[in-house]
Image: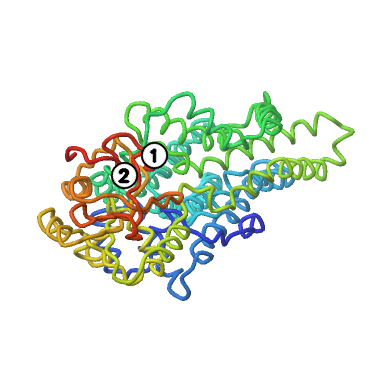
Amino acid sequence: MLGIGLWGLDRGGMWRDEAVTFQVAQRSVPQIWHLLHTVDAVHGLYYLLMHAVLAPHPGEVALRLPSVCGAAATAGLVAALGVRLGRPRVGLWAGLLYAVTPMTGHFAQEGRSYALVAAGAAGTTLLLVRAARSTRPGPWCAYGATAAATCLLHEMALLLLLAHATTLALARVPGRVWRAWLLAAAAVVLALLPLVLVSHGQAAQVAWLARTGPASVRRLLGLFTGPARLVIVPYLVLVALAFRPERTPRGEFSLPAVALPLAAVPPGVLLAVSHWRPLYDERYVLYALAGAPLLAAAGADHLATRLPRLLPHAVPTGVLAVALVLAVQLPLLREDRRPDRRPDDLAAVSAVAHRELRPGDPVLFLPSLARRAALAYPKGFRGIHDIALDVPAPASGTLYGREADPAELRRRLERLDRVWLVAAPFATRRAWRPGEAAERLKLAVIHEQFVPLERIVRRGVTLRLYARRTTYSPGPGSGLPRPVPPSAGRAGPGALGSPPGPPR
């Protein structure tokens, strides 16, 4: 897992979520605390951790190394669960299978908290198995502390407690175990309650999430097993074989009783809730992936015991099978290491800005979050005049800075003869209707008073140069570029780059 995580770790570009981690983690602790009162409280503990990680030498490799380590730790913990609940070969196969799953490799290289949450969830599950067999309070304290830290890294990990409750019910544990678990779970909920209350007030951050349906379930299944058909079918057969008809003694944990709730309960609950109120995203349930390779490895172990001729060679045969899975999915892992496999590439945007913009050029970001490229890679935007910015992001306690009010912004724009617009892709679409007054004003002034001259598109952003209509005169021999025709904007009437329309 460490090898897969380090392979191609420096992609040469961050995408938007990683850029947020990068720029927030480099703020001072008081500035991070200020930010969490208005936005991103759910990632507060992670930002503080990354503040310490990036302090010695900030960079893309340092940004992603904690996730690599988290993924490697999770693979080891999955193996430890397989050994404890099955036998050594079950742990070996499960750990290796977890490591070669493309979903694991993807989040091992993300500068976000999800791989660390997965490590915490696997560790908490292992501590549950140990604590349930102990009569001392120490193991339960360790369980509660680890669960609380995991949930503080991301509050969606709280669904792990439902999975563990299901495991205790399937194992038919005695009352003393239930009482100890309930005390630990209550402590976790109490520790998480302030974060839940604060993040509830910031729920607008996840307004982009969509309702779930059968397609969401099918996609998640492919992510848990690996999307290749050559992998999915054998994987599901092995998972089915894990549920052999054997009665486990009361109070004892079988591997399916631990792995199935871990794999199914958190995603199932979140998918069901999100059918009415969207809260689901695949990365929020990455930690549940640990249950799938455990079930497949248990099924492979059961198959090996049913085939006496295979039994002496079971371990190398299983390792070879995992190697074949890796070979089948290697192209997916290789493609995932390209910068263009992420939603955007802010390094490429900064490179274009460095080539096209000159010191002192006025720049307007539409909407304000389009400023993320300048915050992540400031070199490309060095010396530019950010027209709308009033208070920089760190000082304002926001992700992208506080902009001038509409009246002041209009006065600033009216003094310009030309302006560069840096726009997010959705801001160039006809259907976009910004809710903020300042964003509506930007659109209105650009439509009414400026004409587009140049258009440069890069993944995740569009750069356009505008000139004021009353001063722009590209007559013959002037050397000035002709206005960009409406068709060059790839948008319908009313979108940026098209003829002026009514303010929106």
Give the SS element for disc 2: loop
* Amino acid on which disc 2 is placed: Gly
Is 340 on the left or on the right of 335, as rendered? Answer: left
Q: Position of residue 292 (x, y in %)?
A: 60, 37
Say the numbered circle drawn on residue 310: none
* Amino acid on which disc 1 is placed: Arg
Q: Label 2 belongs to which residue?
A: 497
Kindly identify the residue that appears in the image at 69 percent across and 46 percent down: 330
Q: Position of residue 262 (x, y in %)?
A: 52, 38
Q: CA distance from mark 1 to mark 2?
A: 9 Å
Q: Is 356 or 15 nearer to us in this picture?
A: 356
Q: Residues within 10 Å of mark 2 (few under 14, many from 20)?
A: many
Q: Is 134 or 182 nearer to us in this picture?
A: 182
Kindly identify the residue that appears in the image at 30 percent across and 39 percent down: 207
Q: In the image, is residue 280 above or below residue 43? A: above
Do residues under tags 1 and 2 come within 8 Å of each other at their CB atoms?
yes
Q: Position of residue 104 (x, y in %)?
A: 58, 47
Q: Earlier in the sequence, mark 1 or mark 2?
A: 1
Location of the N terminus by quadrant is bottom right
Q: In the image, is residue 142 above or below residue 381? A: above
Q: Residue furthest left?
A: 407
Say the numbered circle drawn on residue 490: 1
Q: Is 421 or 269 nearer to us in this picture?
A: 421
Is 228 on the left or on the right of 382, as rendered? Answer: right
Q: Position of residue 36 (x, y in %)?
A: 27, 57
Kindly identify the residue that appears in the image at 44 percent across and 56 percent down: 18
